[in-house]
Amino acid sequence: MAAAKSSRRYGPKANKKVERAMHEMKRGKLVSGRSKKKVKSRKQAIAIGLSEARRSGAKVPKRKSKSTSKRGRKSASSSSRAAKTARKSAPKRQGTKRRKTKRTSRPRKSSR
């Protein structure tokens, strides 16, 4: 029989990294990157473990992009533009004018 193709999403190295991050989080030793604050969230601990696994070259799926697709972005921007033009702008409020107070300079103390 031929060897079956590996269809696992995460490699064993990634599993170890996440396991270690979870262990550290439970012991109160896991800290986040730049701020060095203690991690309390389970999800954050998993994210840190996966991030370390990615850096070390383990088999981990690519991150989901935060931004929308080009088509979605294009249609969203055009619809928001139409909504902005349809809205009536409120009249600008006339604020009271502030008078500038004249600053008087105090005589400097001579440093002798």
Image (cartoon, helix red, strand yellow):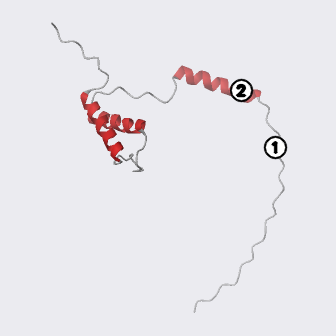
Position of 92 relative to 79 (above/below): below
> Residue 58: x percent and y percent?
27, 30
Residue 57 visible to an observer of this rendering: no
Query: Which SS class for mark 1?
Result: loop
The mark that comes first in sequence, 2 or 1, is 2
For the point 69% across and 84% down, which residue is it?
A: 107
Residue wearing tag 2? 83
Q: Is residue 103 left or right of residue 62?
A: right
> Residue 19: x percent and y percent?
30, 35
* Mark 2 residue type: Ala
Residue wearing tag 1? 92
Q: Is residue 47 left or right of residue 1?
A: right
Which of these two is toward me, 100 or 53?
A: 53
Using the numbered discs, state the Cα–Cα distance from disc 2 to disc 1 in whole angstroms: 20 Å
* Mark 1 residue type: Lys
Position of 12 relative to 99 (above/below): above
For the point 34% across and 34% down, which residue is it?
A: 50
Crowding at dot 1, Cα within 10 Å, few <14 / some 14-19 / many 20+, comes out as few
